Image (spheres, rainbow, N blue to C red):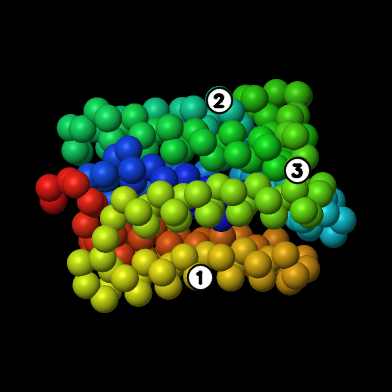
Amino acid sequence: MFIGHFGVALAAKRVAPKTSLGTLILAAQFLDFLWPVLVLLGIEHVRIAPGATRVSPLDFTDYPISHSLLMATVWAIIFGGVYYALRRNSRSALVVGAAVLSHWVLDFVVHRPDLQFYPGGHTRVGLGVWNSLPASIAVEILFFGSGVWVYAVSTRARDNAGRYGFWALIAFLFLGWVSTLFAGAPPSVAALAWGGIAMWLTAPWGWWADRHRAVIGVTQ
């Protein structure tokens, strides 16, 4: 799952209107923001294996700290707890925590059986939607498109930055996802990891665009 995670962040703005889109992106993508760091540190591992699935050329050999169900739950609790400590908003804290955990759920849908329930566990799970290109595209479009629609009808641009900054982010994500479908395998694991770290920029981009938009019906 790639842009589908961003769809969750966008839709979450509807139920947590006073939470920045940047925070929601950080939450929904937290596991993938953490993963490349752990790969570069040699703590988690991935192998480039063209043909591993129809959509992804990656063989996730081990990533229990970032992507096991137990640790995803721990990260969700930590993320939600920190948010509550800073903002004192229990509803929004629950939403951002749920956004973190949603990442594992969506990955479970698309990954082949490579996700663990807990570090050290032998059972690997995943429904394997990535083995079908049409099904993968349909799932991504469903989640991302729904999220964009929910955010777009729930907010309005205050100025041109809110209008064009937001839609530029959407275009960047969509075109970036499309390019991955045709780009082939990355040249190295290091290049893959650094590309993942570059995606961190989407969180401050979302925060900036969201600052220039108002939630309809909510006093800012």
Q: In the image, 80: left or right of 133?
A: left
Say which residue appears at 26% left-offset and 76% top-offset: 160
Say which residue appears at 52% left-offset and 65% top-offset: 173
**129 or 215, nearer to the observer:** 215
The residue identified by callout 3 is 129
Q: Position of residue 136 (x, y in %)?
A: 72, 50
The residue identified by callout 2 is 70
Residue 128 appears in view: yes
Residue type, mark 3 in image:
Val
The residue identified by callout 1 is 172
Q: Tell me the element at label 1.
A: helix
Q: Quadrant of residue 64?
A: top right
> Looking at the picture, does residue 125 appear above or below residue 173?
above
Q: Tell me the element at label 2.
A: helix
Crowd rating for badge 3 (residues with CA inside 10 Å; few <14, some 14–19, many 20+): many
Residue type, mark 2 in image:
Leu
Which numbered disc, 2 or 3, marks the residue that appears first in the sequence?
2
Say which residue appears at 22% left-offset and 45% top-offset: 18
